[in-house]
Amino acid sequence: MFRWREREPGVGTSYGVDWAITDRMGGLSVGSYASLNLGAHVGDDPDAVSRNRSRVARALDLEAGDLRFMRQVHGCDIAVVDRDQDDPSHEADIMITDDPDVALVVLVADCTPILLLDRTEGLAAAVHAGRVGFTNGAVGAAVTALQERGASDLEAVVGPAICPRCYEVPADLREAAAAASPAAYSVSRTGTPAIDVAAGVVDHLQVAGVAVTWLPGCTREEESLFSHRRDGVSGRFAGVIRLLPPEDAA
């Protein structure tokens, strides 16, 4: 179920966190969506998706209704959610909360999932950064939105995404990505123009002063992860983040 997960309780006045990157194992979906598909918009059986989401929620000590999703459109818009605010049809690629009773979910199948945290202020964010979102400034928009809410000591986990060896693009798209961050300029396994979106994301985070943990892995190369570019019809894995209350709040 989880490719990576860390659960750290709150200490003193600092918030803890339960954050994870799922894989495609341990679910109920079949065929191209086998087996832990969490995407409800990709043609999978809705009942299977619902039960898959329930499994992830239970692992986080939550109910399925406590997971918060957004309608991702490769943009920079922001949704602020809590236990009372939940509109999964809202178009956004950045989701923010200060509520430990919900978990934020970003769905991916080649794009870069980003989880952001400020333990002092008790703020969390999930960000969807595909080529377009990265190029148009999704990372900066997320960091700025958190800072406007008081965040000053941000850390991030950047999950697996398609690697540049597998992400061949026209030369003009590579140039546009490189203009956003030189770190994104790359070549494919055959020497053609390519983009390293995750490297560009990490560069933007580090320039903004965010401490980064960058998890390894290429979605197209690893069968344990969903990949739209590899499979065409594909499920979605997720980055998930939940705040845990400060120890002093108990």
Image: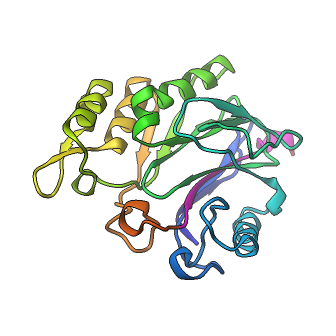
Which is more toward the observer, 167 or 25?
167
Q: Position of residue 166 (x, y in %)?
A: 26, 57
Q: Is residue 4 left or right of residue 183?
A: right
Q: Is residue 8 left or right of residue 158?
A: right
Q: Is residue 129 above or below residue 161?
A: above
User: Which color mode does the image show?
Assistant: rainbow
Which is more toward the observer, 44 or 246?
44
Does the magenta segment cover residue 248?
yes
Q: Residue at x 75, y 46 (%)?
A: 88
Q: Residue at x 63, y 78 (%)?
A: 27
Q: Residue at x 48, y 31 (%)?
A: 139
Quadrant (top left, top right, bottom left, bottom right) of the N terminus: bottom right
Q: Position of residue 20 (x, y in %)?
A: 58, 57
Q: Position of residue 129 (x, y in %)?
A: 47, 41
In the image as oriented, which residue stretches furthest toward the top? 148
Q: Magenta region: which residues?
A: 235-249
Does the magenta segment cover residue 9?
no
Q: Is residue 207 left or right of residue 11?
A: left
| Residue 228 in view in this figure | yes
Tag count in the figure? 0
In the image as oriented, which residue stretches furthest toward the left? 191
Quarter occupied by residue 50? bottom right
Q: Is residue 54 above or below residue 124?
A: below
Q: Is residue 60 above or below residue 151?
A: below
Q: Position of residue 67 (x, y in %)?
A: 75, 54
Q: Residue at x 57, y 40 (%)?
A: 73
| Residue 62 in view in this figure | no
